[in-house]
Amino acid sequence: MSYTIKRFKDGQITASILTKGDLHISLRGNTYEDLFTAASIKDAWDAYHALEKSATTTLTLYCLIGQRSDRRFHEKESFDLKVITRFINSMRFDLVQILHPHSDVSLALIENAIQIDHFEYVQKTYHTIGNPVLVSPDAGAYKTSHSIAERLEANLIPSNKVRIDGKPMISIQGDVKNKECLIVDDIADGGRTFKLLAEELKNQGATKVFLYVTHAQFNYGFDEVKQSIDHVYCTNSYRDIEDPFVTQYEVI
């Protein structure tokens, strides 16, 4: 199956189906325009396949927008992920695939959703570095990090941010002296939290600290992150990055 997309000068998107068949749309999915593009294609496909019963539709989102807004943080604020997933559900895809969602809430809110496993990219990173100690960046990431450590047969050290006398402190729950460490997480927005964690790891004797994130935003660049992290590994699910400090795995 094939289709074309046309963008008008006022921002409007229109889709045209060229041939019949199964539909598979793959998008980064990190903008509202991405989702509207998918909706336009799906609407055109539905019209063209109105009498077709056997053809199937799949939507693959490599970086789901709003995935960290997986609850209503304040009483008067919108539940953004719920708004986004309601729109996705309105397209009525037979299957929705999401690469490394931030939490299970995304999968619960989206109909016919499954997770695309990110393990192969962590595995490549792990072996490229040379079997470092894995570090879970916070309590929320521990369950996923523990699963990865078991699959790799790797050592895992948990960390967490705690407050002592009202001051935020990073707690490292294990020995990292003379070891190379790999922090593993799903998303890097600015990267400051990872920078502070890497500083503490090195304060406790880690020789090098690497970072793997599936969705690499780094909205403020890498200057601050480079102060304590030796190298970043990520996919190009969010954007393409050309920087010798970053190794990217192509997923789209």
Image (tube, helix red, strand yellow):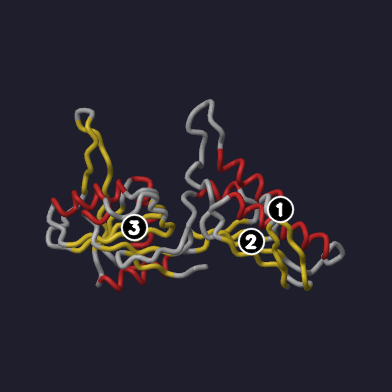
Q: Secondary structure at mark 2?
A: strand
Residue 17, percent from left and from top: 77, 67
Residue annotated with mark 1:
91
Q: Secondary structure at mark 3?
A: strand
Q: Residues within 10 Å of mark 3 (few under 14, many from 20)?
A: many
Residue annotated with mark 3:
184
Whichever of labels 1 and 2 marks the residue nearer the N terminus, that label is: 2
Q: Residues within 10 Å of mark 1 (few under 14, many from 20)?
A: some
Instruction: Please tell me whether residue 97 is drawn above or below residue 126 in the rendered image.
Output: above
Could you tell me how far apart the alpha carbons at marks 3 and 2 are, in whole angstroms? 26 Å
Q: Residue at x 48, y 64 (%)?
A: 117
Q: Amino acid at mark 3?
A: Val
Q: What is the quadrant of the N terminus in the image? A: bottom right
Residue farthest to the right, as pictured: 51
176 left or right of 118 in image: left
Instruction: Please tell me whether residue 193 is drawn above or below residue 97 in the rendered image.
Output: above
Q: Residue at x 78, y 73 (%)?
A: 19
Residue annotated with mark 2:
59
Instruction: Please tell me whether residue 204 is drawn above or below residue 94 in the rendered image.
Output: above
Q: Residues within 10 Å of mark 2 (few under 14, many from 20)?
A: many
Whichever of labels 3 and 2 marks the residue nearer the N terminus, that label is: 2
Residue 57, percent from left and from top: 70, 64
